[in-house]
Amino acid sequence: MTRSVLPRVLGLCGLLSSASACLYTDVRAPLSYGSATPSDANGNLGREVKGSACNHAILWLVAFGDGGYEAAVADARGSTNAPFLVDVKSDTSYRNVLLGVYQRQCTNVTARVPGAPATAGAAPSGSATP
């Protein structure tokens, strides 16, 4: 009796693994992002910010999320009011639980916020001008 069950279980596993996200898929994956360079900010680099965006899949049947660069950069910019980010770097991380019962793919970015431009020849506060 056990021998007749094993081929059925293996066949079902093979069918499920080949039908990845066959019921529903709504994902967005990273392709490219044009990043400003430190020279675009005149070398004035401020604090570092981080952001992430993820795609998820459940039971090989349903996939959803926005794991693209644009969403990850928007997440990083969410904590600042800077018009753009400088020196954006990205990594991708994957998590797979129990042979794909749950899967997560995330795009993680780190970037610098442009700092305030240095003013040349500014008089120190408290000094009198002639």
Image (cartoon, rainbow, N blue to C red):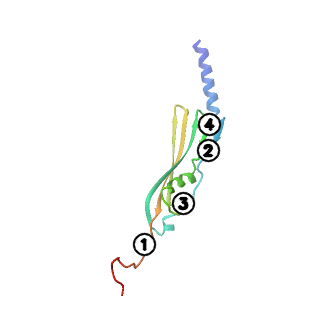
Q: Nearer the viewer, mark 1 or mark 3?
A: 1
Measure how far apart labels 1 and 3 are at the Cα level. 22 Å
> Which residue is depicted at the point 62% across and 25% down?
12
Q: Is residue 80 left or right of residue 130?
A: right
Instruction: List the residue tagged with mark 2.
Output: 27
Q: Nearer the viewer, mark 2 or mark 3?
A: 2
> Circle 2 — which element?
loop
Measure how far apart labels 3 and 4 are at the Cα level. 32 Å
> Which residue is depicted at the point 58% across and 32% down?
59
Counting residues from the N terminus, which is met first, the one under dot 1 or under dot 2?
2
Rendered view: 123 above or below 42? below
Measure how far apart labels 2 and 3 are at the Cα level. 23 Å
Image quarter in which the N terminus is found: top right
Instruction: List the residue tagged with mark 1.
Output: 118
> Which residue is depicted at the point 60% across and 17% down?
5
Measure how far apart labels 2 and 4 are at the Cα level. 10 Å
Q: Residue furthest top?
A: 1
Measure how far apart labels 1 and 2 are at the Cα level. 43 Å
> Circle 4 — which element?
strand
> Circle 1 — which element?
loop
Q: Residue 31 location, x and y as percent? A: 60, 51
- Local packing at callout 1 (Cα closer than 10 Å; few below 14, some 14-19, many 20+) is few
Choose top left, top right, bottom left or bottom right for residue 122: bottom left
Instruction: List the residue tagged with mark 3.
Output: 35
Q: Is residue 130 left or right of residue 72?
A: left
Rendered view: 125 above or below 7? below
Counting residues from the N terminus, which is met first, the one under dot 4 or under dot 1?
4
Q: Tag on residue 62?
A: 4
Residue type, numbered disc 3? Ser
Q: Residue 32 location, x and y as percent? A: 59, 54
Pointer 3 with pointer 4, Cβ within 8 A: no
Counting residues from the N terminus, which is met first, the one under dot 2 or under dot 4?
2
